[in-house]
Structure formats: structure tokens, C-alpha cells
């Protein structure tokens, strides 16, 4: 089990490196919402707010109705002390019908 965890962790860090190359080259690739959440959480736990914000902005451009991603966007805005924008994001999120989903 420990070997599997190490393999998964190693794979994740390879994906992070590939993602950072995409950011550096201003390239956009499709990722599912869960992968974006993992990238975001990685940067947020390392207190790399600007990278977390880049991740979440790219994620929301691909998955605009994901409640989980919108909550993470709110986290970035709170960390950056942009309370009015966070309030507006929350207010807009309440306007999205509950039947909307980013999953197929």
C-alpha cells in the first residue's frame, strides 16, 4: 500500500510539473474538475496564492458551473482580501439553478 501511495504521489508531482509548463507557455489543456481541484489544493497548501488563482481561473473557464471550483475561487478571493468580489461570486452562485452540474 505504501508503494502505491508513493507511486501516486510521484505521478501527481509529474502532473504538477507538466501543468506548470502549460502555465509558463500560456497553453491550455482540458482537465476534469477533480484534477483542477487537486492542483488548486496543492498550491493553496503551499501558500502559492497566485498559482492557485491561475489554476482556478483556468478551471472555471472549462467548468463554469462547478460549485466546488466556485468555492475554491472564493477561497482565493478571501486570501487576497477581495471581499466584495467574493460576495458577488457567492451571490451569482446562488443564481445558478441547482439542477446545473459540471459532471456528465
Image (spheres, rainbow, N blue to C red):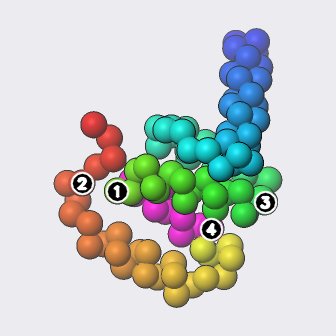
Q: Is residue 30 visible?
A: yes
The residue located at (79%, 53%) in the rendering is 46
What residue is shown with label 2?
Answer: 100
Residue lying farthest to the bottom in this orientation:
84
Of pointers 2 and 1, the one earlier in the residue sequence: 1
- Quarter of the picture containing the N terminus is top right
Q: Give the overall secondary structure of the magenta segment.
A: helix
Q: Is residue 16 visible?
A: no
The residue located at (77%, 59%) in the rendering is 48
The residue located at (43%, 49%) in the rendering is 62
* Helix, strand or loop status at disc 2: loop
Percent coordinates x, y for residue 9 in the rendering: 73, 26
Local crowd size for mark 4, using a 10 Å CA cut-off: few (<14), some (14–19), many (≥20): many
Disc 1 and disc 4: Cα gap in Å?
17 Å
Determine the image quadrant of residue 15.
Answer: top right
Percent coordinates x, y for residue 87 in the rendering: 46, 82
- Whether residues under marks 2 and 1 lie with C-beta atoms below 8 angstroms apart, the answer is yes
What residue is shown with label 3?
Answer: 47
Q: Is residue 82 above or below residue 41?
A: below
Q: Which residues are magenta?
A: 66-76
Q: Is residue 7 above or below residue 65?
A: above
Q: Which mark is residue 65?
A: 1
Disc 2 and disc 1: Cα gap in Å?
7 Å
Of pointers 2 and 4, the one earlier in the residue sequence: 4
The residue located at (64%, 62%) in the rendering is 53
Q: Nearer the viewer, mark 1 or mark 3?
A: 1
Q: Which mark is residue 76?
A: 4
Amino acid at each position: 500500500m505504501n508503494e502505491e501511495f508513493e507511486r501516486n504521489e510521484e505521478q501527481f508531482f509529474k502532473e504538477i510539473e507538466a501543468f506548470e509548463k502549460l502555465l509558463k507557455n500560456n497553453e491550455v489543456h482540458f482537465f476534469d474538475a477533480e484534477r483542477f481541484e487537486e492542483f488548486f489544493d496543492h498550491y493553496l497548501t503551499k501558500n502559492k496564492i497566485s498559482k492557485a488563482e491561475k489554476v482556478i481561473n483556468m478551471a472555471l473557464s472549462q467548468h463554469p458551473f462547478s460549485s466546488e471550483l466556485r468555492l475554491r475561487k472564493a477561497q482565493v478571493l478571501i486570501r487576497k482580501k477581495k471581499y466584495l468580489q467574493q460576495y458577488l461570486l457567492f451571490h451569482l452562485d446562488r443564481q445558478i439553478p441547482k439542477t446545473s452540474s459540471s459532471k456528465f
